[in-house]
Amino acid sequence: MKLRRSSLCFFLGFMLLSFAPSSMARFVVEKNSLTVTSPEKIKGTHDSAIGNFGIPQYGGSMAGNVVFPKDNQKGCKEFDEFGISFKSKPGALPTIVLLDRGNCFFALKVWNAQKAGASAVLVADDIEENLITMDTPEEDGSTAKYIENITIPSALIGKSFGENLKNALSGGDMVNINLDWREAVPHPDDRVEYELWTNSNDECGVKCDMLMEFVKDFKGAAQILEKGGYTQFTPHYITWYCPQAFTLSKQCKSQCINHGRYCAPDPEQDFSSGYDGKDVVIENLRQLCVFKVANETKKPWVWWDYVTDFQIRCPMKEKKYNKECADAVINSLGLDLKNIERCMGDPNADSENPVLKEEQDAQVGKGSRGDVTILPTLVVNNRQYRGKLEKGAVAKAICSGFEETTEPAVCLSNDVETNECLDKNGGCWQDKAANITACKDTFRGRVCECPLVDGVQFKGDGYTTCEASGPGRCKINNGGCWHEARNGHAFTACSDNGEVKCQCPVGFKGDGVKSCEDIDECKEKKACQCPECSCKNTWGSYNCSCSGNLLYIRDHDTCISKTASQQGKSAWTAFWVILVGLVVAAGGAYLVYKYRIRSYMDSEIRAIMAQYMPLDSQEGVVNHVNEERA
């Protein structure tokens, strides 16, 4: 623990010393306009600082009634505990909750108000000072649960303006205000320039997870806007330098490249294990060069593919965050690897790297844009975006940067389609022979996922491998096994008898996957072994024949004469004729016997019955029954 704490303190110390590139550096607070429309005595327009969480309504506005709660006025507890609800009744204006600063995080105040039904939140400062940006706290397991779920806008207002709102409300006045974000992003023309300050480190906690999720979600929309010429996107990466006094220290050597000129924090904040900060700097540099090389080929949008694929295929937790994995991603996207390596230069050189030096210079604010000190940061038309990095919110902010009536169709519809799989199969796995691909176009851009075809699931990483698995595999491209057809007959090594495997069929030998060679039974003396036999091999089988007046018997692998065969056939024929005759004679005798027995039985039965019941045909027999009745 001592090493970890000292390492972290060391890095934070030199970071603060190092990031001072210009005496004119400054942090700019992004603002939106707030107008009080009633009561008359406090009417007017005021500035408010947009919160760095939630979803500001860029390009729009919101009118509502201000409410200052009687209890829980700092909003640090849930309002349900006090029986307070801010839900608007049908037909009423939205409720904008006013809260006091202090005692808890800004984000927690807004979260509690949102759960109680607020449509927006204003936080009144507790001291007289210039407006600041309300930022999120360092996320941990507890804060992350609500920070990611804040969906309403929020802003900080000055102390004196907050007091005026409270006094008006306590006097019984209805306070109506209008929050306006339409000028929060400049919109001078029909093209929007925006940039994303990011990092390739994927082990920095909740913020890294949020950034990676945003890049994957927004990729499809970003590429459509870029391909249509509606936007100009530029990625950036924050880098620091090590103070001269520490360049030879162990910490600087492990966190920096180019002799302390370009540094990044240790991903795990522990110098004794895992990856080093210099690994992050090198990957940041690689991603910058991917963009530059792709931009030179007029395809700058490929950067989004590389970054998302690298996140998926080369994560730190799987120990794949390295050059080999990065090169595999670059090759799958058809980028020029040599040009990218040439752009990166030598990280061990004791000289400036022009690409990273340009990034350090760009961190300093210019014009209306302030210094970039927070990761991640989105800048739209040279104005820093404030709010949650979420696809819908960011798309709205970018679309608000177009001059009115020049917005592209993607800004007017949620139906975003991509066709990335048409270009080099999107860098995903494919089987051209079976016409199967792992590339799938979605509203989030293309993804590489092994497909489900005719009930057969393919498994693999989706980029380099996809293999069919389970029953029915042999129906799909013969299960990836060897197969060939000749002379109208098809042969395959795929067998599906409970356990799917590639095994060469009878008459062939080989691995069953890449090849199966025809076995020459004749050459290997596996057939036609009799002296009179002659053998001829055919593909997948063999034929045996006998010389002269001989006939081949396959079951016994021998030759016999045709005369003997014919005599044998005659003998068998006579045997069957005699047998059939005997069967017919036995059947006839049985019928005669059955007839005579039946006649004998009939006569015996008639004689017996005549003793007790004289038949009508017997004359002279007295009928005693009739006599008695007469």
Image (spheres, rainbow, N blue to C red):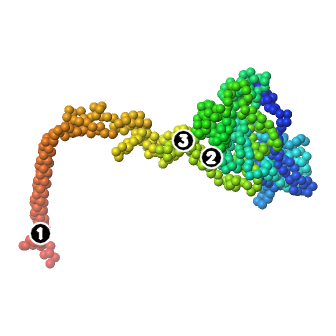
Residue at 72% across, 25% down: 350
Q: Earlier in the sequence, mark 1 or mark 2?
A: 2
Q: Earlier in the sequence, mark 3 or mark 2?
A: 3
Query: Exactly how many numbered labels are in the figure?
Result: 3
**What is the crowding at mark 1: few (fewer than 14 residues within 10 Å), some, or many (at least 20)?**
some
Q: Is residue 86 above or below residue 568?
A: below
Q: 406 or 400, which is in the foreground?
A: 406
| Image coords of residue 293 (percent x, y) | 65, 38
Q: Is residue 549 above or below residue 56?
A: above
Which mark is drawn over residue 445?
A: 2
The residue carrying mark 1 is 614
Q: 485 or 216, which is in the foreground?
A: 485
Circle 1: element type: loop
Q: Earlier in the sequence, mark 3 or mark 1?
A: 3
Q: Quadrant of residue 593?
A: bottom left
User: Alpha-carbon distance for marks 3 and 2?
Assistant: 16 Å
User: Alpha-carbon distance for marks 1 and 2?
Assistant: 108 Å
Residue at 11% across, 64% down: 606
**Residue at the limit of the structure toward the left, as seen here:** 620
Residue at 50% across, 40% down: 467
Q: Amino acid at mark 3?
A: Trp
| Image coords of residue 157 (percent x, y) | 86, 46
**Residue at the limit of the structure toward the right, as seen here:** 41
Q: Is residue 45 visible?
A: yes
The residue carrying mark 3 is 429
Q: Is residue 464 left or right of residue 602?
A: right
Q: Is residue 81 visible?
A: no
Q: Is residue 325 above or below residue 382?
A: above
Quick one: quadrant of the N terminus? top right
Quick one: quadrant of the C terminus? bottom left
Q: Is residue 95 left or right of residue 479?
A: right
**What is the crowding at mark 3: few (fewer than 14 residues within 10 Å), some, or many (at least 20)?**
many
